[in-house]
Image (cartoon, helix red, strand yellow):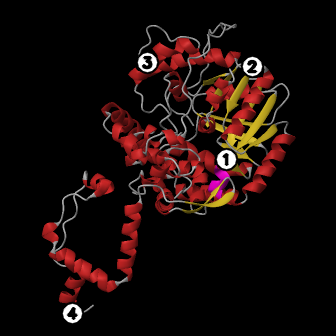
Amino acid sequence: MSGDGATYLGMPGFPAHPPAPAPGPAPVPGPAPASSFPAFPEAARAAVHDERLRANLRHATRTIRDKRARAVTELADWERLREAGRAIKDHTLRHLDHYLIQLEEAVTAAGGTVHWAADAAEANAIVTALVEATGEREVVKVKSMATQEIGLNEALEAAGIAAYETDLAELIVQLGHDRPSHILVPAIHRNRAEIRDVFRAEMARWGRPAPADLTDRPADLAEAARRHLREKFLRAKVAVSGANFMVAETGTLVVLESEGNGRMCLTLPETLISVVGIEKVVPTFRDLEVFLQTLPRSSTAERMNPYTTMWTGTTDGDGPRAFHLVLLDNGRTDTLADEVGRQALRCIRCSACLNVCPVYERAGGHAYGSVYPGPIGAVLSPQLRGTDSPVDASLPFASTLCGACYEVCPVAIDIPEVLVHLRERVAQGGPVTREGVRVRIRPARGHAAERAAMRAARWTLDHPAALRAGERLLARARRFRPRRLPGRTGRAWTDTRDLPELPAESFRDWWRRERGGD
């Protein structure tokens, strides 16, 4: 869902024949590979010193968080809905092969065409070929997180096809040559004055220009976006979408949104291409009953989202004439093979975990180096992309393990459990599934001291006499306690924390003295 601005994009008085399209948009840098992003601590270090960014994030996340809390408490059966969502998702993931085949059969029977994409390159090639087959050189887009994951805009641009984002926040990000920093509100790192400046400077290069006297009033910004986008909606013959859910039973795709742009993208163009992760399938139409209650309340704190659009194949004289569904894997079946990590595939992209996360609130979304920021990104990206790059190896450590993300997740993903599981993988290495093959990965660099410390701790805890001697030694040497720990990790830890004071005697000695025995 997108809940950060424009409502319905209809606007009376727009000319019946829109002006010819402006010259192609200014080039936007393609998504850099994960290996080009710095590790999370390095990226976050710069972000936490950006006072304006922190103020924007603090205001936005706390506002959304408080509204969500009120919306959830209205439902007496919220925990039962949460458990139902978890159960539906887990059942579907256990039988994903069956439900995907059922979905393909239902979509095909309804007049659609299903394509299977193993990875980003294959998905981009399929969509590019489908657009080129229409003879069109531009597309409008909505609900495009999966397409951002695979870098579709850049692939289309390389083929000479312009892709226009139509979610208000996505439009702001695209016009600003920026990257999304939030799942629900991708432009959360921008304030109104910044958005006004982006509209004034960039809209003319992409289509209808912003008014010369545009102010930073929300109503004025929304109106400028409506006028700019309406031109594209009336002209576009091809649309690219994602989907919140796919119903295997009927072949129905579902999009929830708050602005109305999705309704236009999904109904006006002649060709609709939907790129959707394979984990978005649910077995039956009745299952939507749960998620149509939990997703709006967890994301925009609404009892019901303003726009729910559903489509099943094609219908003569109503909606697109051609419908293509691209089912995207791109690491999802590898994630499914991990008994602990697979629960991340339950995610319904509500962003509730971001809004309660103290790390995200201070570091922002760009520090995660992925289209999926925050706690869910910290467990999803390293599984979809692997842990070979510095940023993916660091993401499982981008958390305090406070558990707030688990408490608010509407499908009960135990994110702290997955974080600890992935930390072990990064530090120790071990067996994982890559492209369907079971392989053993090596530990990431920089964790040798941690592994040595864990081995020493394991040996000490297995030998009570050694543990007792160590406790007594520490108690007697407490006056020599250092203020800072050695090593890069130790220094980073004690830069912002004081080491605890050592007691004058160990608990064991106190017990023996007070209780007279072991």
Q: Which residue is mark 2?
A: 136
Q: Position of residue 357 (x, y in %)?
A: 41, 48
Disc with the residue nearer the chain's start (3 vs 2): 2
Residue closest to the eye, 359 or 312 = 359
Identity, as a three-letter code, of the amino acid under mark 2: Glu
Q: Which residue is mark 3?
A: 196
Magenta residues, start to end: 329-337
Residue found 43% across the figure and 8% down from its top: 213
How many circles with numbers are drawn on the protein? 4
Q: Is residue 164 above or below residue 411?
A: above
State which quarter of the image contains the C terminus.
bottom left
Q: Position of residue 53 (x, y in %)?
A: 36, 33
Q: Which residue is mark 1?
A: 280
Are circles 4 and 1 on residues that touch, CB within 8 Å? no
Crowd band around label 3 with a 10 angstrom C-alpha radius: few (<14), some (14–19), many (20+): many
Q: Which residue is mark 4?
A: 516
Q: Is residue 23 above or below residue 59?
A: above
Position of 427 with respect to 512 (left or right) is: right
Crowd band around label 2 with a 10 angstrom C-alpha radius: few (<14), some (14–19), many (20+): some
